[in-house]
Structure formats: C-alpha cells, structure tokens
Amino acid sequence: MKEVLDLRISFEPHNDGPKQFVINGVDNYNIATTGLPAYYPVQYYLRNDAGEVLGGLLGGILAIPLTAVMRVLLSRYVWKKRKAA
C-alpha cells in the first residue's frame, strides 16, 4: 500500500529559496535530457513610436537545433499593458 502524503500548494511571491530550487530542477532536467547546458536569455518588448514599453515576453532558449527552438521556448512571463480607461 502506498503512503498517502499530506501535500499543499503555497503562495510565496517573495520567497526566492523555493523559486531557485524549482529553477535549478528544471534546468538540471533540461540539461540531462538534451545533454546541452547552454541557455540564452530571451527578452522581447513591444514598444510604441515613443519607445514606451507596452508589453513583453521573457524567457530563454536552450542550445538546440534551430528547428526545435519553438518547442523549447521557456516563457516565464507574458505581459501586455492595458489601455487607460
């Protein structure tokens, strides 16, 4: 018989310890799976004519063949500025 674990989900927006633990776990899994440790940050911004940032996409790309890049684009945040009412 399997042991039943008492699990919970916690919301901790300002606790970097668990955040880094999860990031390291994902990174280590990706390196073990692909055999490629290189990682390149990606930062795309949508700007208006005045240069004001209206939105953006942040994440990273693993060092893999270009044909597979879209499958492993790891977007962390997608944000779009809302128009003022």
Image (cartoon, rainbow, N blue to C red):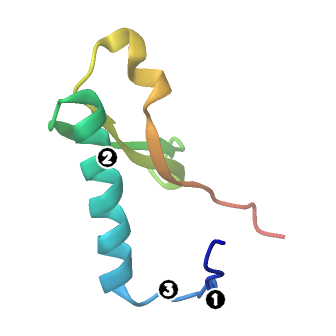
For marks 1 and 3, give the one nearer the viewer: 1
Q: Residue at x 44, y 42 (%)?
A: 74
Q: What amino acid is at disc 3?
A: Pro
Q: Residue at x 18, y 30 (%)?
A: 35
Q: What amino acid is at disc 2?
A: Tyr
Question: What crowding class fits label 3: few (fewer than 14 Cα within 10 Å), some (14-19), or many (20 or more)?
Answer: few
Quadrant that contains the C terminus:
bottom right
Label 3 SS? loop
Q: Which residue is mark 2?
A: 29
Quadrant that contains the N terminus:
bottom right
Residue 36 in percent (x, y) is at 17, 30
Label 1 SS? loop
Residue 82 in percent (x, y) is at 72, 61
Of mark 1 and mark 3, the one earlier in the sequence is 1
Q: Which residue is mark 3?
A: 13
Distance of label 1 from label 3 (alpha carbons):
22 Å
42 w.r.t. 13: above or below: above
Question: What crowding class fits label 1: few (fewer than 14 Cα within 10 Å), some (14-19), or many (20 or more)?
Answer: few
Q: What amino acid is at disc 1?
A: Asp
Label 2 SS? helix
Of mark 2 and mark 1, the one earlier in the sequence is 1
Q: Is residue 5 or residue 71 the one in the foreground?
A: 5
26 w.r.t. 84: above or below: above
Q: Residue at x 43, y 31 (%)?
A: 72
View extreme (left): residue: 37
View extreme (front): residue: 1
Q: Which residue is mark 1?
A: 6
